[in-house]
Structure formats: C-alpha cells, structure tokens
Image: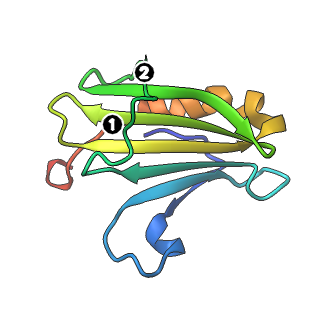
Amino acid sequence: MNYPKNWKIIDIREINKNDSAFSGVILTDTTAELPGTMNIFISLDKENKRFSENFKTEFKMNDSNLRAYLIEPRTMAGSTKYQFYIFNNIGTEKLTINAEVKQRFFDQYKNDVEAVVRSIRIRKKEDL
C-alpha cells in the first residue's frame, strides 16, 4: 500500500500489548494539529466477521485481483467514519478498513484515504 510520507504506520500489537499475532495496522497523519484528526485502521478479517449487508457500493481497486466495497461516510459526534471491505477473488484474504476523521477535516482527507485503500495489495508472507 502507498501512503503519504508524513503519515505513520503503527502495528496494532504496539498499542495492544496482549496481542501477539499480527492483526493489522493503524495509519495516522503525524502533521495534524490535533491528535486523532485522521486515523485509518486496517484489520485482518479471516473469519469474515466484519462484512455486512451495508457494504453495497463497489469500490475500484488498482489490483484487479481484489474486490472492494464501501459504506458511504457517516458522521456522529464530530467524527466521520468511512469504511471499506476488501477481499481477493478467491475470498481467502479479507481486510476491513475504518477511516475515522474529525468531521471538519473529512473533505481534506477523503481523497487521500481513498488513494491509500485503492493502492492496497494483499499478499501472503510466503509470496513476499
């Protein structure tokens, strides 16, 4: 995946010390004036638990081996949530992406969030 140089990628295990297995990452803009202005949570979803009927709108990916759907952005309590669900064509690898952006900055970050999601490629460790 590609993301802006001023964004930081954090392994979720660095935040939740009780997790020993890799479960995903968080991307955050390190130049934002307020902490928590923009965070993208990218999580593995091996058991398809987070996919729901709300993911109706297809989202075009750069990698034609991936299918993606989104839930239109919704705002609650001053924060806008933008969700994506990605899986490969054989359905064995699945990701949930939750972007959470302070409402007043959502228009500023929307295109960047979509570009990051669109650039994701899923590969197994043994294929790297």
Q: Nearer the viewer, residue 39 or 69?
A: 69
Left or right: residue 66 versus residue 111 is left
Looking at the picture, which amino acid does disc 1 mark? Arg
Q: Nearer the viewer, mark 1 or mark 2?
A: 2
Density class for disc 1 (Cα within 10 Å; few <14, some 14-19, many ≥20) is some
The colour scheme is rainbow
Q: Position of residue 81 (x, y in %)?
A: 64, 39
Density class for disc 2 (Cα within 10 Å; few <14, some 14-19, many ≥20) is few
Against 12, residue 4 (above or below) is above
For mark 1, give the secondary structure. loop
Label disc, if present, on residue 45 of the rendered structure? none
Looking at the picture, which amino acid does disc 2 mark? Lys
Q: Are marks 1 and 2 in contact (CB under 8 Å)?
A: no
Task: State the quadrant of the N terminus.
Answer: top left
- At 72% from the left and 36% from the top, the residue drawn is 75
- At 64% from the left and 52% from the top, the residue drawn is 28
Question: For mark 2, what is the residue?
Answer: 56
For mark 2, give the secondary structure. loop
Q: Position of residue 106 (x, y in %)?
A: 74, 33
Question: For mark 1, what is the residue?
Answer: 121
Quadrant of the image occupied by residue 91: top left
Cα distance between the residues tagged 1 and 2: 21 Å
Residue that sits furthest to the front in the current view: 53
How many dots with numbers?
2
Quadrant of the image occupied by residue 86: top left
- At 23% from the left and 25% from the top, the residue drawn is 65
Quadrant of the image occupied by residue 107: top right
Q: Nearer the viewer, residue 3 or 16?
A: 16
Q: Position of residue 124 (x, y in %)?
A: 20, 49
- At 54% from the left and 40% from the top, the residue drawn is 3
Left or right: residue 31 versus residue 47 is right
| Mark found first going from the N terminus, 1 or 2 | 2
